[in-house]
Amino acid sequence: MKTLRYSLLTAWIVFLVVIIGCVTSPAYKSLYTAGHATDAAVKSYFDLVVAGKVRTNGVPTVAKAYTEFQAVYAVALKAAQGNINAPPDATVIAQESEVFSVLEKAKALK
């Protein structure tokens, strides 16, 4: 009985540690992954525009948000001394979120 109780307690503690660790971890663990994901999403959007699958009305907004992301990313990369494996700071994550938000709105234009 004691073994079962300790096993359940141990399992519960492990579960909580995993959940808390997942919730508090940033979406991207490095500047590289944040930059690569954003670049790929913007490229994909522009490919859809060229293919005529989405309207061009969102292009200026997407371009502006992406340019702002690139500026923030460059500052973060310089602060990390060029280390693309450094974790992204809050400004990079916030600007990246802005790019993805703008992309979703631009893709919804019909």
Image (cartoon, rainbow, N blue to C red):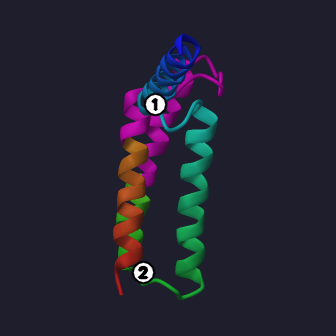
Seen in the picture, residue 30 relative to 3 is either above or below; the reply is below
72 or 40: which is nearer to us?
Answer: 40
Seen in the picture, residue 68 relative to 50 is either above or below; the reply is above
Disc 2 is placed on an element classified as helix
Q: Which mark is residue 69?
A: none
* Residue appearing at x 55%, y 40% in the figure: 34
Asked if the residues shown at circle 1 and circle 2 are in contact, with their CB atoms under 8 angstroms apart, the answer is: no
Q: Which mark is residue 19?
A: 1
Q: Is residue 55 left or right of residue 30?
A: left
The amino acid type found where label 2 is placed reads Thr
* Residue appearing at x 62%, y 40% in the figure: 33
The crowding category of the residue bearing disc 1, from other C-alpha atoms within 10 Å (few below 14, some 14 to 19, many at least 20), is: few
The crowding category of the residue bearing disc 2, from other C-alpha atoms within 10 Å (few below 14, some 14 to 19, many at least 20), is: some
Q: CA distance from mark 1 to mark 2?
A: 41 Å
* Residue appearing at x 52%, y 86% in the figure: 53
Q: Quadrant of residue 101?
A: bottom left
* Residue appearing at x 57%, y 42% in the figure: 35
Quadrant in which the C terminus appears:
bottom left
Disc 1 is placed on an element classified as helix
The stretch of residues the image draws in magenta is 66-94
First along the sequence among labels 1 and 2: 1
- Residue 8 x/y as whole percent: 51, 22
- Residue 72 x/y as whole percent: 43, 35
Would you say residue 49 sits in the magenta stretch?
no
Would you say residue 92 sits in the magenta stretch?
yes
Foreground mark, 1 or 2, reads: 1
75 or 15: which is nearer to us?
Answer: 15
The amino acid type found where label 1 is placed reads Ile
Q: Which mark is residue 56?
A: 2
Determine the main secondary structure of the stretch shown in magenta: helix
